[in-house]
Image: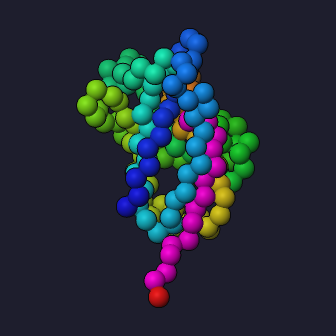
Amino acid sequence: MQFIRLIGVLDDGTDIRPRVPRHSAKTIQLPLLSDVTIEVEVVNNQGVAVELSTSSPTFNSWLTIVQNPDSCEQASGKVDFQLASTTVKLLTRNIIVFAITKSALRRFPAGRYFSDVSLDFSSVKYQIVRISGLHLEPALRRA
């Protein structure tokens, strides 16, 4: 199993602090024949953890994988793969967790894709991890 940790920034309209990633994009490499857990720590522009477990209204979150970066934002094109998340509270921070199984990735050929992570509050979508490169790698064979 592979574990990936990302920072997602929920833009609250304030000035972004220097320690908060201005551009949340991060290239990810995933092996095709392995289960993967992606955790996204959601913070606001000040770097403060966003309290998702008590938010009202409740939210939905999505990890989207596409071949064409123009269609990464969910409403604007063909989505090749989309996964809803579960949310868990770890210590004092809220984390969005995406569990991707090897069987879900099996239908993709190895190669370059694009991904993003978004939150949906009452039908308003917030892209918290910007469009990023995603490389699906063939499994290594042992001699």
Which secondary structure class fits the magenta region best? Answer: strand
Residue at the extreme left of the image, as rendered: 91
The answer to whether 109 appears left or right of 100 in the picture is right
Q: Compare residues 118 and 6 and report the one nearer the observer.
A: 6
Q: Is residue 24 visible?
A: yes
Q: Position of residue 72 (x, y in %)?
A: 66, 42
Residue at the extreme top of the image, as rendered: 14
Q: Is residue 65 visible?
A: no
Seen in the picture, residue 41 relative to 32 is either above or below; the reply is above
Q: Tell me what residue is drawn at x 68 percent, y 47 percent.
A: 78
The stretch of residues the image draws in magenta is 129-142
Q: Tell me what residue is drawn at x 58 percent, y 43 percent.
A: 26
The answer to whether 51 appears left or right of 12 in the picture is left
> Residue 12 colored magenta?
no
Q: Compare residues 7 and 87 and report the one nearer the observer.
A: 7
> Residue 130 colored magenta?
yes
Q: Quadrant of the N terminus?
A: bottom left
